[in-house]
């Protein structure tokens, strides 16, 4: 009987410890930007509301690795942040702005993620809600990135915040496009004609 009581107590205290550690892992991170996120074409149009925005760990090397251009996922040792169960939580979107019609601001967002797994994070933002679908439809996609920030030490309420554009606007500064098939064919036809003319 004594043995049973001991086992019972061990199970009880293990459960308490597990619960305590579960609550001690993870933090609520408020993600925001003081300055707007802009498109790079005219410097006047903000990133559209609803556009995809990812919170990404810079990994062990602490730098932003080049994005995989096949599917626009983080490259190298980078990954979208997860919670303590491994569920991806770092996908959010651009908001419509605090005071419409002002846009270009991240939806005021609290992200509950596992801060014990990550020490440096950044954001990558796209010009579309679904970058891969946009690229498949138009052969073009644009995106931008913030600097790398240290994960803040959470306060006594397990909360912290990062201003991803604290002192200047962030621009969508990349353009990825493939040649239109028609353009490639026309180019070949043109080269062929040039060769024909030279032979004459
Ligand atoms: Ca990295």
Image (cartoon, rainbow, N blue to C red):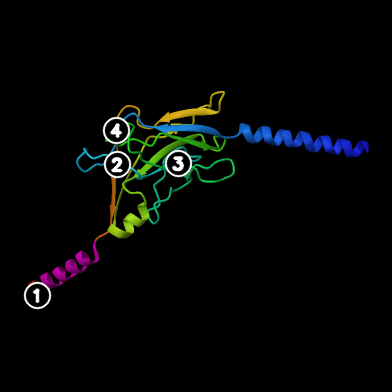
- Identify the residue under disc 2: 47
Which of marks 4 and 2 precedes in the sequence?
2
Outermost residue, bottom side? 200
Secondary structure character of the magenta stretch overall: helix
What span is in magenta?
Answer: 180-196
Which of marks 1 and 2 precedes in the sequence?
2
Which of marks 1 and 3 precedes in the sequence?
3
Q: Residue 56: which numbered mark, if any?
A: 3
Residue 150 horizontal/vertical position (percent): 47, 31
Mark 2 neighbour density, 10 Å: few (under 14) some (14–19) many (20 or more): many
Look at 68% across and 35% down and name the residue there.
Answer: 19
**Left of 43 or right of it: where is 58?**
right
166 falls in the magenta region: no
- Identify the residue under disc 4: 169
**Which quarter shows the C terminus?**
bottom left
Tag count: 4
Looking at the image, do the residues carrying marks 2 and 4 touch, with CB atoms under 8 Å apart?
Answer: no
- Distance from Cα at disc 3 to Cα at disc 1: 57 Å
Could you say which is closer to the camera, residue 31 or residue 142?
31
Label 2 beta carbon within 8 A of ligand 1: no
């Amino acid at each position: 009987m004594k043995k049973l009581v001991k086992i019972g107590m061990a199970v009880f205290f293990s459960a308490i410890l597990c619960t305590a550690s579960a609550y001690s892992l993870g933090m609520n991170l408020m993600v925001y930007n003081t300055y707007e996120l802009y498109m790079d074409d005219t410097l006047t149009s903000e990133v559209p509301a609803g556009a995809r925005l990812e919170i990404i760990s810079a990994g062990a090397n602490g730098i932003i690795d080049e994005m995989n251009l096949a599917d626009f996922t983080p490259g190298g040792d980078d990954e979208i942040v997860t919670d303590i169960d491994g569920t991806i939580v770092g996908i959010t979107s651009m908001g419509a702005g605090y005071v419409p019609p002002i846009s270009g601001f991240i939806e005021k967002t609290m992200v509950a993620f596992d801060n014990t797994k990550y020490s440096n994070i950044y954001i990558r933002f796209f010009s579309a809600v679904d970058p891969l679908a946009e690229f498949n439809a138009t052969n073009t996609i644009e995106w931008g990135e913030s600097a790398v920030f240290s994960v803040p030490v959470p306060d006594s309420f397990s909360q912290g915040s990062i201003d991803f554009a604290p002192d200047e606007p962030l621009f969508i500064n990349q353009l990825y496009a493939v040649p239109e098939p028609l353009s490639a064919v026309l180019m070949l036809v043109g080269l062929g004609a040039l060769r024909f003319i030279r032979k004459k």
